[in-house]
Image: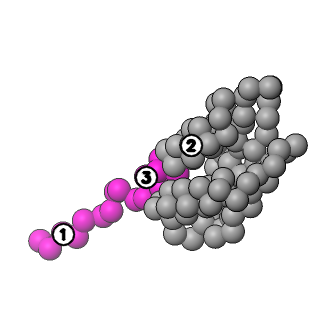
């Protein structure tokens, strides 16, 4: 899985990059082992508000992207909000893709 981390008019430090990579590898690989790439963009909205945008290509072949956004007064908190939303969406997508109506064999 390829992780791209960037900042829009904002410097992304090494500690934040390590935090993002650790959290996303655990969260995305938990639901989709073959995820292709993840893109994270940090930006500063106001003098006190940070925004984190996450886009995940889950690798299911449906060409669908999962997007999540978080806003907070700290950059780590904004990312954690966005990561929670992404994990929730991926969990729901995996549940939707899983076939729960398997045909039962009848031996009569």
- Do residues under tags 1 and 3 come within 8 Å of each other at their CB atoms? no
On the image, numbered disc 2 is attached to which residue? 80
Q: Secondary structure at mark 3?
A: helix
Q: Secondary structure at mark 1?
A: loop
How many other residues sit within 10 Å of disc 3, few (<14), some (14-19) or many (≥20)?
Answer: few
Q: Earlier in the sequence, mark 3 or mark 2?
A: 2
Q: Compare residues 77 and 36 and report the one nearer the observer.
A: 77
Front of the two marks 3 and 2? 2
User: What numbered label is drawn on residue 106?
Assistant: 1
**Over which residues does the magenta segment extend?**
89-108
Q: Compare residues 14 and 108 and report the one nearer the observer.
A: 14
94 with respect to 45 (left or right): left
On the image, numbered disc 3 is attached to which residue? 95
Residue 96 place in picture, x, y as percent: 47, 51
Residue 108 place in picture, x, y as percent: 12, 71
| Cα distance in 3D space between marks 3 and 2 | 23 Å
Residue at the spot x=67%, y=40% of the render?
75
């Amino acid at each position: 899985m390829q992780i791209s981390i960037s900042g829009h008019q904002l410097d992304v430090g090494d500690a934040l990059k390590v935090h993002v990579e650790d959290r996303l590898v655990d969260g995305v690989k938990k639901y989709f082992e073959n995820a292709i790439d993840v893109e994270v963009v940090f930006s500063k909205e106001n003098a006190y508000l940070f925004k984190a945008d996450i886009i995940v290509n889950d690798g299911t072949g449906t060409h669908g992207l999962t997007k999540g956004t978080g806003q907070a007064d700290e950059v780590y908190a904004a990312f954690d909000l966005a990561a929670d939303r992404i994990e929730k969406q991926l969990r729901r997508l995996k549940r939707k893709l899983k076939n729960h109506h398997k045909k039962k064999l009848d031996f009569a």
